Structures are given as structure tokens and as C-alpha cells.
Amino acid sequence: MMSVKFKGNAVKLSGKELQVGQNAPEVGLVNKDLQIVKIGGAQGKYQIINVVPSLDTGVCAVQTRKFNEKAATLPNANVYVVSMDLPFAQGRFCATEGIGNLSTLSDFRKKEFGLNYGVLLADGPLEGVLTRAVFVVDPKGKVVYREVCEEITNEPDYQAPLKAIQ
């Protein structure tokens, strides 16, 4: 079982650890209008899947704003932010922050994303939410980039996922 750190303390992740070169599982997540959106799998475009514990924290908000800026320059990619936040909170966050270039999606119903991508926190103070990670899936559905942040409170690399699609 893989683990990451939260404020220096080890916490376990549950689910299948997804690696570069593997097929990205297609999962259904809930958007701000309570509609199911499928991500992963072959979508014919690149997918940048930005995973955060909660949009209500400073680091998650910064990460989402930075990927929103980058998304505006990527016509060949769909950019998503996935968290366990309820769709209403995700919609409010985007409205407040003026975020319109990416889609917020919630894994709150079945934790299907967290389990299929191996990023669901299995213990610790944040048990039940997603750890901080970034996946890039190519148009054919293969994972071409993966970063699971070793320390949940640290921002991910912003350049490497963009390089993976250029």
C-alpha cells in the first residue's frame, strides 16, 4: 500500500496504484450541475486531472488557479479538478475565483476515482478525501504523466504535466 505524508506524518492511500503507461480507467464524476461527467479512458484529447483534498484550503486554491491559467493556453486538452468537495461548493469556488477554463468534478458519491487511481486517503486526519496528485492522460487513454505529491501540503510540479502534452 502506497503512502504519502500529511504535515510530516505518513498516511496510507487505498485503491489501485496507477502508473505511467497504464490505461486510465474511465470513471463517472459529478459536475456542479449534478450531471455525470466521464473522465479517463480515450477521450480524443489530452486530459489533465488535477486532484486536490479540498478547494477550501489555500494550497488547493493556488493549484486550481494555476491550472486554470494554463488551461486557457491548451486547446488540445481538457483540464479537470477532482476533489471530494460537494458540487455546490466547487461551483461557488469557481464563481468566486473567476475560474472558467477547467471543470470541477466531485468524487463524493462512490469514491470511484480515488479507488481506481489509488489516491484515496485510507487513514490520518484527512481519511476519506483525495490526496494531492496530477495525472495526464493522452487522447488514446494512456497515462503519460503521474505525480502523487509526497507531502500533501506541498504544491505539485506545474511544468512537467504541460511538457507531457506538448
Image (tube, rainbow, N blue to C red):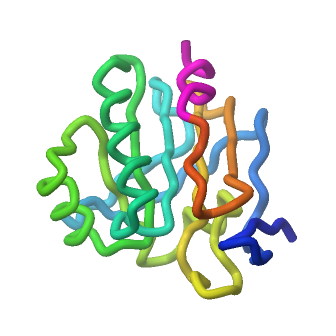
Q: Residue 69, percent across and down?
A: 31, 31
Q: In terms of depth relative to the viewer, which is nearer, 86 or 147?
A: 147
Please provide percent x and percent y for residue 103: 30, 47
Identity of the residue drawn at 48% across and 34% down = 47
Is 56 left, or right, of 20 in this rendering? Answer: left
Q: Quadrant of residue 8?
A: bottom right
Q: In the displayed structure, would residue 111 be above or below residue 92?
A: below
Q: Is residue 75 magenta?
A: no
Task: Describe residue 43's horizontal placement relative to residue 135 as left or right.
Answer: left
Could you say which is closer to the camera, residue 31 or residue 125?
125
Start and end of the magenta stretch?
Answer: 158-166
Q: Quadrant of the C terminus?
A: top right
- Give the residue displayed 59% in from the left and 34% down from the top: 137
- The furthest residue to the right: 1
The part of the image, by quadrant, that contains residue 144 is top right
At a point 45% along the width and 57% down the height, the residue shown is 59
Q: Is residue 21 above or below residue 18?
A: above
Q: Quadrant of the N terminus?
A: bottom right
Residue 25, x across and y down, in percent: 62, 50
x 37%, y 48%: residue? 64
Q: Position of residue 154 (x, y in %)?
A: 60, 55
Q: Residue furthest front?
A: 8
